[in-house]
Amino acid sequence: MSASSPDRRRFLALLGAGAALPFASACTAKPAAKGRFPVMKTEAEWRRTLTAEQFYILREEGTERPFTSPLLKEHRKGTFTCAADGTALFASSTKFDSGTGWPSFWKPLPKAVGTSSDRSLGMSRTEVHCSQCGGHLGHVFDDGPAPTGLRYCINGDALKFRPA
């Protein structure tokens, strides 16, 4: 089995989700990306505009359970946007089934996302956030398909889908 096979990724995703579950209620997720962004709101304003799950993911850098997002089965032409501010993030033509349980893309739209280093959970990963509001979207890994070789593993609750 190759290091990037869907079966291995699915196993690792489930293992990681299972390992994190006992700590989920004991740990508070860290805040969304630091800095100034074009879209800035207070915590109270974000809480009014986002669902509890969206707030947890986008503003507290949480993670949804794998295989729970309806967007896993979204195959229409269109654009995946930030659930917090509506910024266009990913074209549907870049979506693929990674087998991990989260919507996955091999390339974001130009200037749509930013990245930062994430050293939580005892590992080093690259976090992906919305370039406009700083909301946490997920992580990017180097085990994706051609042409980029990247896998943007994105929480479905951080996204909305806009059909073409």
Image (cartoon, grey):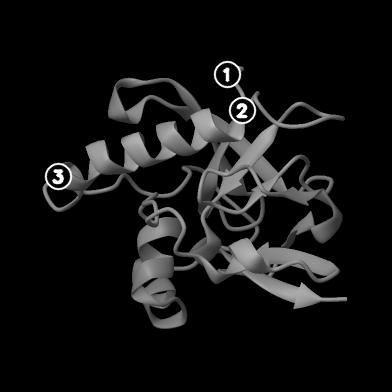
Left/right of residue 146 with respect to residue 137 in the rendered view: right
Kind of residue indicated by mark 2? Ser
The structure residue drawn at horizontal position 52% and vertical position 45%, both measured from the top left corner, is 138
Q: Residue at x 81, y 49 (%)?
A: 94
Disc 1 and disc 2: Cα gap in Å?
Answer: 7 Å
Q: Secondary structure at mark 1?
A: loop
Q: Which residue is mark 1?
A: 1
Task: Give the residue at x 61% y 27%.
Answer: 5
User: Which type of secondary structure does the marked residue at label 2 adopt?
Assistant: loop
Asked whether disc 1 touches disc 2, contact meaning CB atoms under 8 Å apart, the reply is yes
Q: Which residue is mark 2?
A: 5
Disc 1 vs disc 3: which is toward the camera? 1
10 Å crowding of disc 2: few (<14), some (14-19), many (20+): few
> What is the C-alpha distance between the residues marked 1 and 3?
29 Å
Residue at (51, 28) in percent of width and height: 8
**Element class at badge 3:** helix
